């Protein structure tokens, strides 16, 4: 009998339970995944569960993804939460041009975390300038890229509007190395 598609992710998550359980107190104390847990999740392809196959991901069915998450959560709910947040962010790869998706998801560690829509980007020659302090989602400490939805303002500070009068919203992705992370 063959295993359902993506079931190997469930088995890999189950195999990681002793490590995650061992590090759970440290994860809680420091409010971030330990390097050992992060590396194990990466090496076992768990962050790539929802990444499109065209980029080397598993593109797992949601049932297998949720079962994988459940196995991780049995060991530590915070680890499952961070893994889930970043795994869902990987689905954005399907909407990016190939080179950008490769740069974000196939350059180690290849993890994207997301922030809230609370800020603006200013139009500048050649693109946009973001200079704000965001509250980022769980998983940002192990992410190599960060993303956020932002309102666009013109160089003079005037909010850019769409044809229907609503604010123009853009999605921005940027290397985590270009951000300063503060402990909140």
Image (cartoon, rainbow, N blue to C red):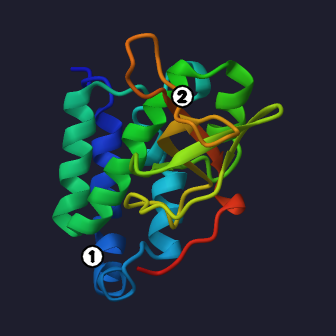
Q: Quadrant of residue 5?
A: top left
Residue at screen point 41% across, 37% down: 49
Image: 104 above or below 18: above
Residue highlighted by disc 2: 160
Q: Quadrant of residue 17?
A: bottom left
Identify the element where label 1 is drawn: helix
Question: Where's residue 7, x and y in %?
Answer: 28, 34
Tell me: 49 left or right of 66: right
Could you tell me which residue is drawn at 23 percent across and 69 percent down? 76
Picture residue at 24% right of the left edge, 24% below the top: 4
Q: Position of residue 127 (x, y in %)?
A: 75, 33
Question: Against 79, is 144 above or below?
Answer: above
Q: Residue furthest right?
A: 125
Q: Mark 1 vs mark 2: give the one in front.
A: 2
Mark 1 and mark 2 lie on one chain; the one further toward the N terminus is 1
Q: Residues within 10 Å of mark 2 (few under 14, many from 20)?
A: some
Residue 91 lies, in percent from the top left, at 44, 30
Q: Quadrant of the C terminus?
A: bottom left
Q: Going by the image, does 68 lie left or right of 49?
A: left
The residue that mark 1 highlights is 21
Image: 132 above or below 63: below
Residue at image point 42% right, 48% down = 86
* In-front residue for pair 114/54: 114
Residue 3's x, y, as percent?
Answer: 26, 26
């Amino acid at each position: 009998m063959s295993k359902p598609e993506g079931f190997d992710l469930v088995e890999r998550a189950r195999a990681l339970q002793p490590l995650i359980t061992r590090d759970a107190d440290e994860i809680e104390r420091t409010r971030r995944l330990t390097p050992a847990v992060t590396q194990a999740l990466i090496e076992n392809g768990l962050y790539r569960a929802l990444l499109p196959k065209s980029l080397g991901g598993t593109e797992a069915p949601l049932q297998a993804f949720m079962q994988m998450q459940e196995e991780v959560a049995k060991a530590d709910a915070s680890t499952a939460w961070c893994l889930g947040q970043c795994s869902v962010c990987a689905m954005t790869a399907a909407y990016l041009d190939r080179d950008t998706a490769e740069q974000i998801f196939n350059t180690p560690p290849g993890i994207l975390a997301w922030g809230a829509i609370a800020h603006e980007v200013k139009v500048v020659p050649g693109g946009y300038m973001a200079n704000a302090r965001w509250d980022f989602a769980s998983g940002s400490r192990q992410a190599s890229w960060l993303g956020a939805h932002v309102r666009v303002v013109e160089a003079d500070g005037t909010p850019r509007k769409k044809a229907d009068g609503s604010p123009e919203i853009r999605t921005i992705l940027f290397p985590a190395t270009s951000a300063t992370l503060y402990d909140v």
